[in-house]
Each structure stands twice: as structure tokens, then as C-alpha cells.
Image (cartoon, helix red, strand yellow):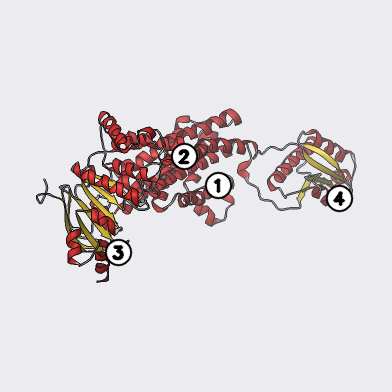
Amino acid sequence: MNRFFGFVKKEFQHIFRDVRTLVILFGLPIVMIILFGYVVTTEIKDVKVGIWDRSRDQLTIQATQKIFSSGYFIPAGTISHEAEVGALFRSGKAKVVVVFEADFERNLQRDRRAAIRLITDASDANSAQLAQNYLQGVLMSYFLSLSPDIQMPWEVELKSRMFYNESMRGVYMFVPGLMALILMLISALMTSVTITREKEFGTMELLLASPLKPREIILGKVTPYILLSFVNALTIILLGILVFDVPVVGSIWLLLGECMLYITMALSVGVLISTVAKTQQVAMVMSMLGLMLPTILLSGFIFPIDNMPPILQWISAILPPRWFVVIVKNIMLKGTGLAFIWKETLILAGMTFFFIMAAVKRFKTRLE
Amino acid sequence: MRGASNHIIEVKQMVKKFGSFVANDHLSFHVEEGEIFGFLGANGAGKTTAMRILCGLSYPTSGEIMVAGFDVYKDRERIKRKIGYMSQKFSLYDDLTLTENIRLYAGIYGLGRKQIAEREEQLLERLGLTHVKKRMIREIPLGWKQKLAFSVAIFHKPAIVFLDEPTGGVDPITRRQFWEMIHDATLEGITVFVTTHYMDEAEYCDRVSIMVEGRIEALNTPALLKQEYESKNMNEVFLKLARK
């Protein structure tokens, strides 16, 4: 046992003596959380709105006032020509232009139907969509307050096509995704790199020729990362709670248990990568391209899985982070117990088992 | 325990195949206790493959192999306790200090705290490295690293030490000093099994085997080999064998 502890201690020394490793281990999660939390905000503030009022009746003037008293929008001037829309967008003076049709009030009273057009500068698709949603909300509530029984008294027509990521509504939806990403990154990337490093420097041969058993070597290499990944999981949860008011509605123990399962899975992926990669660089690229990108793109973390083409949905289904995100969202946000996420947990456990077996098998074959 | 009287390594008809490629073609040889056994051959001749099998790093395809009295098929774990190993790369950790490296390996081989402290002090003194013992390995010169790596490989007083091209990329003076250290190790009763492709180094060995394309083409003392192949030095012996 002493042999083993000496070996684990050495691994900790590697970690704490390498600034790069430390930055990735502790800096990266914090920076990512803060960045995602503040930059990828889904709230809007001070969006510049231009008004093209072709009617200038009482209703349109009041609607305009409503818009600017909502607190989200600031006036960017009024225009009176189609051509001015483009000019406003190009000069950056406005992000949205609200167009009231001519004879707005009269149309509404006579046909119970009038049109408002929202033209959005969609070069920044996300904020454009957000601004548009907010504007719709403001206008809708105004017209509904006029007469509650009118159904959709206005039409909104959009000039541009936009993609939107539904899951980014709500400031804390990204925390589960970030957890999946960061834990995968730390666990898999770091273990694959650290094991490959021993291979590259020739120390692995020496360890294998020593009385340490192969499983002790692997376990010794990953033990520090199990602990550190766990610390990271806690950090993310805490940052979420303290800085962004992300709730943990469900059982924290269940959440931590699922995190451990996920970490174990990621570590075995790391070991698996290390049996294939010959150098640290290769291991790093494999982890980045093979793990990070799919986790970001296909786990449902940013882009909703339901909107993907079928083939990508299938790929997504074989990615562990996808199931982990579902589990974490359920526990953290909805407070679901194991009874409702046992299926996802089982899938994740199965994948974990698969990766461990594959890693062990590859590691052994390499020795023969 | 041991098969033949003082044969610390006994190899009979060892074969190692990778697919259809035969890396070791029916090797048979023995190593006597306390000698320096040189395992020579060009790159790719199968030296490292054979050595890895003897160290328990890989299984042979067939053959009978005993190392330090243990069977390589059944008793790899016990063999590993009895041997030391130094690879072509110096196998010390750059970001650990000299002391930490020594203690790490000593610990892995199950040495006690007191024993480690004692031997560590002796070792550092003998190498004249006491003043840098708290330095990181990456801060000390290559020659020192290599000597330290060798000392670490025999720190637990193994029965046999395997050296895989230990002198690659080192200047001639350090190489000479290094061979002196190897010689000193045999005085402590350690058997040395060394692979190299520097033919001049063969002169330092008690016996050498020369491998060509997976087979042992010659095995004898350097003096007798030179006589047999009517050569001035081992390099000539090797060239004659390779051209055969």
C-alpha cells in the first residue's frame, strides 16, 4: 500500500508544480462559469429601437411609449422611409425597427386586425431573437390590456431567418452543460495527457518493469484527478448557487453521486485515449476534438437535440455528456429523484462500464 | 531455486512474433550470475524485444525462459521485484527533485524509510551530488542525470539490472565513467544485461551476443570473438557477421 501512496503523492507533485496544469484544473472552470454566466446572458438591456410609425394615432403612440417605458429599450429615433431602416442598422444606431402600418387604429377597430412589423438586425442572431421576443411580449401585453377578448390583434412579420438555441433561455440552464463539459475536459484530457507523458518520457516502461501492477499504475495516475474533478464539481455547483442563484432543488447527494459516475466515465475515456495516443500533443488534440467539441455541440448543452437532423441525434445519443446533462438538469432544476432518471443513469453506468473494459483491454494488449 | 548452477537467466528456444514478423527467432542463451552480458545488434535486430520479455514487459510467443529463478509466464510479479531497469530515455521525473526521484523509486520497490535514508545519503555522496539534492532533475546536466538514473535502477539491490541502450546521446567521457559504474555494480553482485549498438562498448562486457535479424549469430567473450572472426575490434566482428 505504501508503494501506491508514494506513487499517488508523486502525481500530486506533478500537478501542483506545473502552472499550466493548475490553470487548466482550477482557473478554467471558474473562468468558464463566470464567462458563461455574465457574457452569455439571456437578458437584454438598452436595446436601441427605431420607430417607423405610419399611422400616428393614439394607439401607436401609446404602444411606442409602452415599449420605451419597459426598461429594456431606448429610442433610436423615428424614421419615415423604408430606406432608412437599412441606414439605421448599418450605422448601428438601432437593432430593431418597429413598423406600425398606416391607419393602424382604424384597421384594428374595423377589421379587428392590424399589423406591426418587427425588423431585426439579425447579424447577432441571439440578441436579435431575444430583443424580438421581449418586444413581442411588451406589445402583446399592451394590446391584451386594451381588450382581453381580442385574440392576437396584430401580426408580426420577420424579415430575417434566425437560429435560436432554446436552451439558453434562463440564466442557469448552462450550468449543467458546463458541468458536463468541464468534468469531461479535466478528467479525460488531463488523465490522457498525464499518462501519455509517462510514455513519452520513457518512465512508463520503468513503472511497468517495477513491482507496481498495471492497475496500480493506472489507479495511481487517476486518483488525484478523481479528487480534483470532484472538487471542481463542487466548485461549479457552489459558484452556480452563490453567484448566479442556480438552485439545487433535488438531492445534493444524488447529484454528487451522478457526478462521480460521470467522472469515472471520463477518466476511463482518458485512459483509453492514452493507450492510443503516442505523444501528449496527440492526446490533447484527440481529447479536444473528440470530446470537447461533441460535448459542446451535441450534448444539448447549447443546441437543442430535438432540432438536430436525425443522424446528429443518433450521434448525440451515444455521447455520455448528453445523458449527464439530462440527469443534472433534472436533479438541479426540477428536483427529480432517481425514480425518474434511472434510465439515464443506467445508460451512463453502462457507458462507464464499457469504457473501463475497453481501456483495460487496450492497456493490456499494449503490454503484450 | 535456480535451474542451472549459476545461470541467472536461462533462455531456450525463445520466439516472439508480431503477426507474421518474427522479431526473435528461436533464441537460446544464458547469462551467468555476476557477469556483464552485452546484447548487441543493429537497430531493429530484436534486442529490445527480447529484453522486454526478460523484464516481464511482454510475453514471448513460445520458448522456455527463466529469470532469477522464475518463469516469465507464471511469475512476472516476482521477477519484477528481482530486477532493475533503465530505459534509453533517462526515466527520471524532470519536475521532481533528486531526492524525490530516489524516494519514489525506492518506495515503489518496497524499501523502508530508514533503509532509503541511509542508502540515499551514501548514493548522493558517492556521485558527488549531495549539494544539488534539492534541485529539480531538469536543472542538472545530462551526464549526471544518466548516472543517477543508473544508480536509481540498482538502488534496491536487484539481482539483475537491464540497461536498454543506456549510453545513447552521451559524450565519450561520460560514457566511460558510466561503464565504470556498471563495473562497480557487478562487484556488489549485480548481474548486468546491457543492450547497445556501440560496438566499442562490447569490449567492456564479459560476454557478448550479437543479434542479426532476430537471430543470435554469435555469442562469446569479446576476445574469443575477435579471434574467431580474425578481427582487430568488435566493430569488424559485427560487420563480418552482418554481411554473412
Q: Hey, which quadrant is residue A174 in on the image?
A: top right
* Label number found at residue A341: 2
Label 3 sits on residue? B19
Q: Amino acid at mark 1?
A: Ile
Residue A26 rendering spot, x and y as whole percentages = 51, 35
Q: Chain of mark 3?
A: B
Q: Residues under labels 4 and 1: Cα distance?
A: 39 Å
Q: Residues under labels 1 and 3: Cα distance?
A: 41 Å
Residue A235 rendering spot, x and y as whole percentages = 51, 32
Q: Amino acid at mark 3?
A: Gly
Residue at the extreme front? B232
Identify which residue, A66 or A257, lies in the foreground.
A257
Q: Amino acid at mark 4?
A: Glu
Q: Residues under labels 1 and 2: Cα distance?
A: 22 Å
Label 1 sits on residue? A296
Q: Residues under labels 4 and 2: Cα distance?
A: 54 Å
Identify which residue, B31 or A303, lies in the foreground.
B31
Q: Quadrant of the N terminus of chain A?
A: top left
Asked if the residues shown at circle 1 and circle 2 are in contact, with their CB atoms under 8 angstroms apart, the answer is no
Q: Quadrant of the C terminus of chain A?
A: bottom left
Label 4 sits on residue? A84
Residue B43 rendering spot, x and y as whole percentages = 32, 61
Q: Chain of mark 4?
A: A
Is residue B219 depicted above or below A197 in this figure? below
Q: Is residue A303 visible?
A: yes
Numbered-mark total: 4
Is residue A339 depicted above or below A356 in this figure? above
